């Protein structure tokens, strides 16, 4: 297992408990490689060993350069229920039920690198929304050939009020400044085991306002299936990140506030922490 972390000045790589500073490193090159693990080994051959990063206090940039960030929706039964609840008044609930059972998954463009935020940076809610939640998601790193080679943590910030008003408003509910956080790093490893835990904690005024947990086993669709649909008749010359949906949904009476601290943890991937602007 190899971890890649992006600071404002350089990349840090950790492997087998040893930390290295890689001044000459390109995520684009990594995602373009057909053998990412071997590509990292070549970088490590000339990297300088250094001390470990303090991931509790070090702000990091998202592990993305020219990669597009996409997301899959309604991949958990809990997500299906929540989307049907929020869209019921508008009559759009039937669409979420259908896509959960359909062969074709829901996929949508989530963010470009400029709109994404990293670990310990601030995420945003829309000014014209009054019901907003974070969506903790295991996120796939997919190379330009369509192969999943790594994993990270994603926060798909979402306006439930806008999406619930009309499913056609999905891009406005999902894509805006600071609507996405990714990190803390990119981990090259075997696929997470089914029992891998995904947890969410939201702190407000120093107290826990919400907490929830699910497991990778609750994702309905296979990772390879999602990657194949994303790359079908599409081109990603620098690869892509793909969020795989959420199984943790705060209750309808909960909405994010400025100053809330959102912490998303996934076994072996660490914790992605962001304050709400």
Image (cartoon, rainbow, N blue to C red):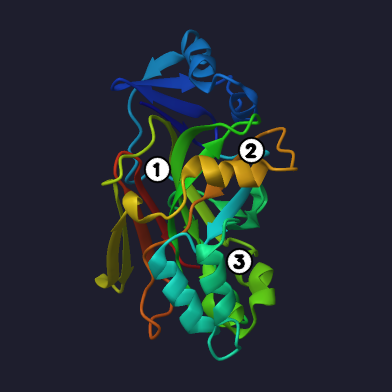
Find disc 1 in the rendering and name its residue.
Answer: 58
Is residue 128 or residue 142 the one in the foreground?
142
Q: In the image, is residue 262 above or below residue 241?
A: below
Residue at 41% from the left image edge and 20% from the top image edge: 20
**Residue 234: x, y in percent?**
74, 42
Residue at 50% from the left image edge and 68% from the top image edge: 277
230 relative to 220 in the view: left or right: right
Find disc 3 in the rendering and name its residue.
Answer: 174
Where disc 3 sits, the SS reads helix
**Residue 108: x, y in percent?**
64, 58
Where disc 2 sits, the SS reads loop
On the question of residue 60 being in view, the answer is: no
Where disc 1 sits, the SS reads loop
Q: Quadrant of residue 189?
A: top left
Q: Quadrant of the N terminus?
A: top left
267 relative to 50 in the view: left or right: left
Residue at 56% from the left image edge and 61% from the top image edge: 102
Is residue 115 or residue 93 the one in the foreground?
93
Residue at 30% from the left image edge and 74% from the top image edge: 205
């Amino acid at each position: 297992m190899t971890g890649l972390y992006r600071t404002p000045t350089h990349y840090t790589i950790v492997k087998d408990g040893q930390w290295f500073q890689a001044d000459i490193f390109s995520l684009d090159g990594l995602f373009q490689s057909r053998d990412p693990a071997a590509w990292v080994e070549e970088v490590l051959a000339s990297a300088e060993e250094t001390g470990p990063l303090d991931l509790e206090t070090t702000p990091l940039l998202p592990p993305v350069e020219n990669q597009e960030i996409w997301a899959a929706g309604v991949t958990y039964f809990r997500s299906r229920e929540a989307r049907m609840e929020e869209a019921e008044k508008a009559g759009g609930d039937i669409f979420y039920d259908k896509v959960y059972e359909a062969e074709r998954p829901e996929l949508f463009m989530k963010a470009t690198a400029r709109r994404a935020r990293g670990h310990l940076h601030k995420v945003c809610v829309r000014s014209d929304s009054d019901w907003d939640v974070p969506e903790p998601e295991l996120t796939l790193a997919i190379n330009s050939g369509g192969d999943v080679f790594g994993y990270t943590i994603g926060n798909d910030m979402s306006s439930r009020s806008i999406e619930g008003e009309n499913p056609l408003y999905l891009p406005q509910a999902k894509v805006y400044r600071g609507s996405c956080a990714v990190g803390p790093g990119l981990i090259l490893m075997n696929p997470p085991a089914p029992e891998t835990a995904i947890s969410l904690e939201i702190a407000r005024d120093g107290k826990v306002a919400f907490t929830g947990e699910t497991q990778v086993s609750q994702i309905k669709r296979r990772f390879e299936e999602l990657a194949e649909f994303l790359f079908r008749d599409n081109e990603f010359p620098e690869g892509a990140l793909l969020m795989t949906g959420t199984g943790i949904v705060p209750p309808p009476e909960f909405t994010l506030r400025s100053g809330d601290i959102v912490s998303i943890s996934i076994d072996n991937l660490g914790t992605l922490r962001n304050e709400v602007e």
